[in-house]
Amino acid sequence: MRRIDRIFGWLLVAGAAGHTAGTIMWTQPMSGIFIWSLGSALAAGLLGTLNIVRAGRPQDKTLAAITLIGTACWVPLALSFGVSIGNLFDARTLFHAIVATALTVFSGITLWGCSAREHRTAQPSTAA
């Protein structure tokens, strides 16, 4: 499961790299859209990287919460891009939305696992 989680993190990093390449190839350098597009690529790359780190740290509740919120927010942003270009089913839109959805689920599993472990360790011992 952890391996699949990391694969999705790397997919988001790869998507960010593709986003960067597309920005450089198809937008006017130093235009407003160029700068904002590079910023979005940076955000996707950071989210992917944080999720890769989270996959290796199942005890880190704070990191799981950060990745849960960040990747959950990435889904509607990706879908909004599809709406803005008039094609919700564009491959770029679907790729980012699907990968971010999977990472959101994995982040939730990590966060839920942390909470369950804390709950078990907080239980007083009944042995006398």
Image: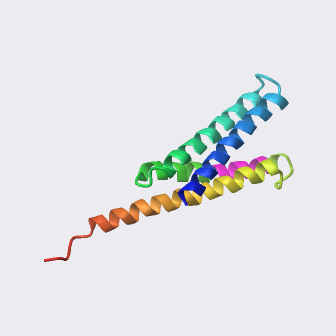
Residue at the limit of the structure toward the right, as seen here: 86
- Tell me where residue 28 appears, x and y as whole percent: 83, 25
Residue at the limit of the structure toward the top, as seen here: 30
Residue 77 is covered by the magenta coloring: yes
When the figure is inspected, residue 110 is found, relative to residue 42, above or below; the finding is below
- Tell me where residue 104 appears, x and y as whole percent: 58, 56
- Tell me where residue 99 appears, x and y as whole percent: 67, 53
Residue at the limit of the structure toward the front, as seen here: 3
Image-based side of 61 in relation to 67, left or right: left
When the figure is inspected, residue 31 is found, relative to residue 59, above or below; the finding is above
- Of residues 4 and 47, the one nearer the viewer is 4
Residue 97 is covered by the magenta coloring: no
- Of residues 62 and 99, the one nearer the viewer is 99
- Tell me where residue 35 appears, x and y as whole percent: 72, 28
Image quarter in which the N terminus is found: bottom right
Please state the extent of the stretch shown in magenta in the rendering: 74-82
Instruction: Determine the image quadrant of residue 19.
Output: top right
| Dominant secondary structure (helix, strand or loop) of the stretch shown in magenta | helix
